[in-house]
Image (cartoon, coloured by chain):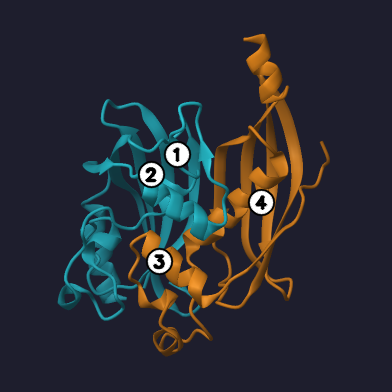
Chain colours: A cyan, B orange
Amino acid sequence: MIGLEKHAEALRAELGKERAERLGVLSGRDIARFAVVTGQPERRDVTGAVLAPPTFLSSIMGWGAGVPDDELGGDGTATEDTRGLPLTGVRLMGAGQELEFHAAVLEGTVVVAHTSLVDVRLKEGRSGPLLLLRILRRFTTDAGTPLVTCHESFIAR
Amino acid sequence: MTDRITPYTVRTSHVRLFRFSAVTWNAHRIHYDTAYARSEGYPEVLVQSHLHGCFLANAVLAWAGEGATLRALRWTNRAIAVAGDVLTVTGTVTGAETDGAFRLVSVDLEERNQDGELCTPGHAIVAVPSVSPREVTSDG
């Protein structure tokens, strides 16, 4: 429990701090691949631009090039997979999302993710101690127009 | 509109899970490395939490038909699913209200595996055109 208590203490210092990350221009190919893999039909708007499936933005774990193999943890994950939070050495599992969809997400859109930690709880689970985290990500255009709001829950052991 | 959505069934596979990890840039070995997943105490590689959410979205949108869009979706990953599992999403309409040219339909969702175990409960609000897109276009 001591290790997780230290993580909880470090995480509480992060509560409410919002970080903005420019994710770049959405690629029609990336959207189309996501649709194919998840079994969704391709959808386009009236201009012919590819429409992203609703869960596209909130499912992508990394938007950059990533890190070399020797910088990955033993489980294959990188620090950036923890939404930038100080969680080195713990296992992080997704536990669900709560999504609001504000506008259609089209290929060619420049997207910015505004991420903040909104809740940290230390709990004794059936198989040992765990941390329950809730992270808010607001996806907007670079002009600030809301696209998707995502509250995501994680379990860290 | 019926009070139950059309069931949506998908068989998971190693290839699908690998491709979902690739397209979402998720290198966690628990989703594509069986030996690693077993070392963590799981019988097989795990279906990604986000992929469960995609299946719920697919189920609602396939049932709601052309022109429907999601306004909200939430889910909880309650039990694991692994490669080879057959997952079926069912849903019950719990309410509806008018929003301009749309009906906002609320749906409680359940995704269960082939043994009937509840993997992912959820809820969606889907906007369904009150009239067909063709009718809207011709009026506009």
Whether callout 2 and callout 3 share a subunit is answered: no
Q: Chain of mark 4?
A: B
B128 w.r.t. A129: above or below: above
For label 3, count other residues whose C-alpha is less than 10 Å away and answer few (under 14), some (14-19) or many (20+). many
**Residue A63 screen position, x and y as percent:** 27, 53
* Farthest top residue in view: B140
Kind of element beneath mark 1: strand
Left or right, residue A101 beside residue B130: left
The image quarter in which residue B119 lies: bottom right
Separation of marks 1 and 4 at Cα, in angstroms: 21 Å
Residue position marked by numbered label 4 in the rendering: B59
Kind of element beneath mark 2: helix
- Asked whether the residues under the numbered discs 2 and 1 touch, taking CB atoms below 8 Å apart as contact, a structural biologist would say yes
Q: Quadrant of the C terminus of chain A?
A: bottom left
Give the foreground label among 3 and 1.
1
* Farthest front residue in view: A48
Separation of marks 2 and 3 at Cα, in angstroms: 18 Å
**Residue A28 screen position, x and y as percent:** 38, 44
- Asked whether the residues under the numbered discs 1 and 4 touch, taking CB atoms below 8 Å apart as contact, a structural biologist would say no
Kind of element beneath mark 3: helix
Q: Chain of mark 1?
A: A
Q: Tag 4: residue type?
A: Ala
Q: Which mark is residue A50?
A: 1
Separation of marks 3 and 1 at Cα, in angstroms: 21 Å
Q: Quadrant of the N terminus of chain A?
A: bottom left
Residue position marked by numbered label 3 in the rendering: B21
Whether callout 2 and callout 4 share a subunit is answered: no
Pick the residue in front: A87 or A61.
A61
Residue position marked by numbered label 2 in the rendering: A28
Separation of marks 4 and 3 at Cα, in angstroms: 21 Å
